[in-house]
Image (cartoon, helix red, strand yellow):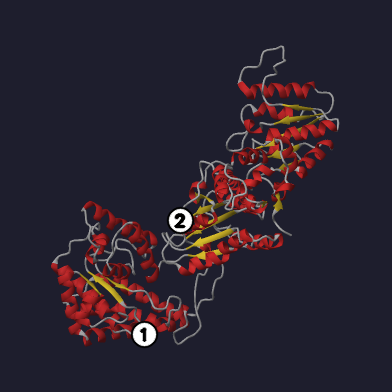
Amino acid sequence: MSVTIPIRDLPLAITGFEAVEAAYPAELTAIVEALRADLPVLIECDKGLGPWLWRCVRDRIKAAGLQSVYLNGRPDPNATTPPMAGGIVATMIGQLRDAVRGATEQRVIVLPHLDLLVTGQGGLTTDAREVIPLLYENPNLVWVGFKDPSMTLPKVIETLFPRRVAILGIARERLRYVVTQGEAQKFGREFNPYALYTHVSGLHTARLRRVLPAIVGEDFPLDPRPAYDQLRQATLSSDVAVPNVDLDRDIGGYTLVKTRLRSEILDLLALRATLQDVDGIARIEQLVPRGMIFWGPPGTGKTLFAKAMATSLGAAVTIVSGPELKSRWVGESEERIRQVFLQARQAAPAIIVFDELDSFATARGTYTGSGVEHSMVNQLLTEMDGFRRNEMVFVVGTTNLPESLDPALLRPGRFEFQLHIPFPDADDRRAILSVYDQKLELKLSNAAMDYAVRRTSGVVEGGTSRFSGDHLQALGRTIARRRIREALTGPTEVIDVEHALTAHLDLPKLTPTEERVVATHESGHAICALHCEHAPPIERISIRGDLAGALGFVQYGDQAHKYITTRAQLIDHICILFGGREAEDLLLTDLSIGSAQDLERATGIARGLVEQLGFGTEVRVWTEGRAGQPEPVPSESGKERLEAEVLRLLAEQRERARDLVREHRAELEALRDLLLDRKVLDRGQMSAVAGVPRGG
């Protein structure tokens, strides 16, 4: 069956009340049947729709012989007594009292302003305490209450209404009955309710009837996009906006991430927009995930990818910080989640981004706070389960700790699509830097670009994290500010990149003796790394103290293999860790305490090899303290054997490191002296004394 409808089959004209009747026939029937059965009804809808909806209900129940009273808080113009002082609430309470205590026959009482009786936290106002007894006083009355979707009612009011009818937006299959022929002509030669619904799914009919006549442009356009753009602007509130982040132009690298996002989400939705087959569209709508987890280290662009996805879909983005949702007031955190989803559905197509989702959606049973997290998770799941399948609303949760999330969030139908966004590798860093080179007019030379890619392979100077996309952006901005400040017009060279990375650091002032110790220590690490077959290539050595917590360091390049770590690599790592201490022992008269962390790390690796990875003489793995799954501990004799195996492994690698620094003493001293002279050495400078490093 085709999705398009001939324009001649649409109504020529339609009034607002006719549109409401046409849009919500099932809902109106349910309300009227409940009232005819003397059952109070709570209608959840936007305030702008309430009066139109009640007019349609009133006409139907009037035909059935039911009387109704609409308590809107407005003074009766025909009343002989003056209106009560105190405003709309006082007038409404007076009207309610008269209706309850003056009625002897059965009638329907309409309460259009229940929100005036409720506080922001879902409690009762002072005035409401007088109202509640009245609501339960007269059994001859049948109540109709109107509730805004964003409002929470207290239980004492909710229990008054055994029937509830919720109306949000409009169903796609009803669009053909509320759009006129003249309005449809602005979108092409045939009416496509599927294309229109993408932009109006969250609009109730009364608002839709105000928006559609305002669309201007030629009739039967070959390109309907200008008309849809006008519609998109009319459906956006002041709190949301459509971002402008191109997946390729504004995000460098991450080819695999982009490919997966396109193949699993964007390409399917693009295909859906071109289909003319109802069944084909339905299949895609059933398959496209609505909930997604973007996970990875901080600064790698998780939110940026969500914005790029929104740009591709023409969707509005609402970014919500997980910690900011929490409130000390009972019910307010859940209310904030409801508001976020309501706003997104009204501005569809839309994407909700829950930044730091793990701040409240951790696995239940692990909460350490007030317990509000449990209610927030339940509310989040309720809102996601309440989506219509054809609504273009997506939820993205970003986190650094996906393993901590509540498993209920990750089942199919919720956050079933998970996208890993790791630290950028060399190719990604080059692409990211190229984006900022163009945007910020950095004019990076080829040598500067190559140096920047290599230089950012390790840990951020002054910190403990690896270089992320945010760090690379900060590098580009630092270079750009200096170029403007100093009116530089030539290309950016290697020295400019290094200046941008280190000029702001508060470097320690080492004495010549201290520099000699640090240079000897780091040269020992480097010599062992150069002569250990399975060690990664060295990119840089520094003794300036430009890494937090270390007076010197050896920076290594990206591993050739990212996902497999071998026994030989770990053993070489232990040897390299001993290299600094053994170099000090060979060339200095005393040892410094700078090897303490090296020895701690070496011992940890050795224990892991023997006790956790089964690489010792005993293949049995002994691990104590695994959460929820205690492992058997070895016997005393078993512990002694394991400890002896660890000590043997450490002793072997210490001896190996000692042999390497002694065998290559000339290189060690030359490298130390060059470090003392230049403070920082890159791969090319090291080749003068130690040969070209492996991987270079």
Q: Is residue 265 left or right of residue 55?
A: left
Q: Quadrant of the N terminus?
A: bottom right
Where does the image place residue 493, in percent across and percent down from the top left?
Answer: 24, 65
Q: Which quadrant of the view contains residue 643?
A: bottom left
Element assignment for label 1: helix
* Residue at 53%, 67% in the rendered image: 260
Q: Nearer the viewer, residue 525 or 505?
A: 505
Q: From what the image shows, is residue 522 above or below residue 295?
A: below
Disc 1 marks a residue whose amino acid type is Arg
Asked if residue 516 shows in the view, the reply is: no
Q: Is residue 134 left or right of residue 599?
A: right
Determine contact: label 2, label 1, CB under 8 Å: no
Q: Nearer the viewer, residue 275 or 377?
A: 275
The residue to which callout 2 is attached is 245
For the residues labelled 2 and 1, the Cα–Cα distance comes to 56 Å
The residue to which callout 1 is attached is 648
Q: Nearer the viewer, residue 536 or 497?
A: 497
Asked if residue 587 shows in the view, the reply is: yes
Label 1: how many Cα within 10 Å (few below 14, some 14–19, many 20+):
few
Tag in front: 2 or 1: 2
Where does the image place residue 503, in percent across and percent down from the top left?
Answer: 23, 58
Where does the image place residue 573, in percent across and percent down from the top left?
Answer: 35, 79
Q: From what the image shows, is residue 601 above or below residue 124?
A: below
Element assignment for label 2: loop
Q: Nearer the viewer, residue 106 or 291?
A: 291
Q: Quick one: which residue is furthest to the top in this view?
A: 80
Disc 2 marks a residue whose amino acid type is Val
Q: Earlier in the sequence, mark 2 or mark 1?
A: 2
* Residue at 61%, 50% in the rendered image: 379
